[in-house]
Amino acid sequence: MTFLGPWGIDLPVIDTLTAFAQAKIDELEARSLLRRLKPGRRFDDIFIERDSQTLISFSCNDYLNLSHHPKVKAAAIAAVEAYGAGSGASRLVTGDHPIFAPLEARLAALKGADAACVFGSGYLANTGIIPTIIGPDDLILVDALAHACIWSGAKLSGAKALAFRHNDAEHLAELLTEHRGSATRALVATDGVFSMDGDIAPLDEISAVARAHDAWLLVDDAHGLGVVGDGAGVGRLFPQARIDLAMGTFSKAIGGYGAYVCATQPVIDLIKSRARTFVYTTGLPPASAAAALAALEIIESDPDLVARPLAKARRFTSALNLPEATSAIVPILLGESATALAAARDLESQGLLAVAIRPPTVPAGTARLRLAFSAGHPDEAIDRLAEAVRPWVSR
């Protein structure tokens, strides 16, 4: 096999990269772990079209259905008209458009912090924040089920990174007792609401342990903001907890894109000066920032809307006699990846979208349907989902 090289010369193809990729694809396919994109058009709050089929989606993180809210869309459109489609540069160059200041002020007020910093995405936030404050002489303790971007940030920091058992403050204390003395600084990092399990970190216990060992606490509240704590997020559930870095995203209940961290003013000033994923990337588009600000205004003014996702999730868990939901996320653990894929296909044949979640997103042997409930889901749709899932729960 040859390809046409420079000056029209036929050259042999020795493409080891393609061979490597194909071998990995074949391996993943054999283990039911290959992932492929499936384009879908979201019509409104809960309906999505895939392969010419309209489905009720129980896999979307748009918990309050704000991505289609008229006020949110209008704010985004107005921002494009006023400031253009993009920021044009890093925020430290010319990309700090006027919407950022009120957005960061509102986030800080909601979280009870001095200040806030907006990032381009949740992954950029955690991979920027952690290496800014933690380095090779330091220690980071991460919940074993924390989001991948926290682990990526820990690796980039060069610090000694250890996992503590999921939501186990006693194990965290054991690890800090053993390792804290050899580290200059220490950070404890955890999700607030865990994205694949829907449970909530015991931040009162974790905070107490962290403070006892002079360790800072970072909480990723991506799936808590707008849903728990009357919309303020998981920190509101634990008023005694000290959260040094309150991080979250705009891509879940906010309905848009982007992320933030709230902290004291000096911490935010340091992050804005030294976080590589802030300094060396273009600022968030004006439309995304304006949409987030409009969404926050809705969240703070409509407590009934905020209460619905959890109420919908609890209707589902009650129907199947499952443990009561503590967030908008309910996992149906099925074990093997092939089983989870079969369950997802079964539900899709009934007009319900519940995407199968497989390793490495979740630990081996815990493939699942990860169900996400939103304010817009009709009760009859939830009851229909419960009946469709029932045979898989009872297997």
Image: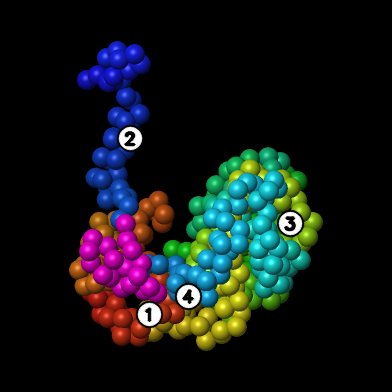
Nearer to us: label 1 or label 4 = 4
How was the colour assigned to the protein in this rendering? rainbow
Specify whether residue 179 is in view: no
Q: How crowded is mark 2: few (under 14 residues within 10 Å), some or many (20 or more)?
A: few
Q: Distance between the residues labelled 1 and 4?
A: 15 Å
Q: How far apart are marks 2 and 4 (CA)?
A: 42 Å
* Residue 139 relative to residue 121: left or right: right
Secondary structure state at the residue bearing disc 1: loop
Query: What residue is pinned by disc 3?
Result: 268
Query: What residue is pinned by disc 1?
Result: 377
Specify whether residue 382 is in view: yes
Residue 69, which numbered label?
A: 4
Residue 128, which numbered label?
A: none
The three-letter code of the residue at mark 1 reads His
Percent across and percent down for residue 142 are 58, 55
Q: Which residues are the magenta region?
A: 39-57
Secondary structure state at the residue bearing disc 3: helix
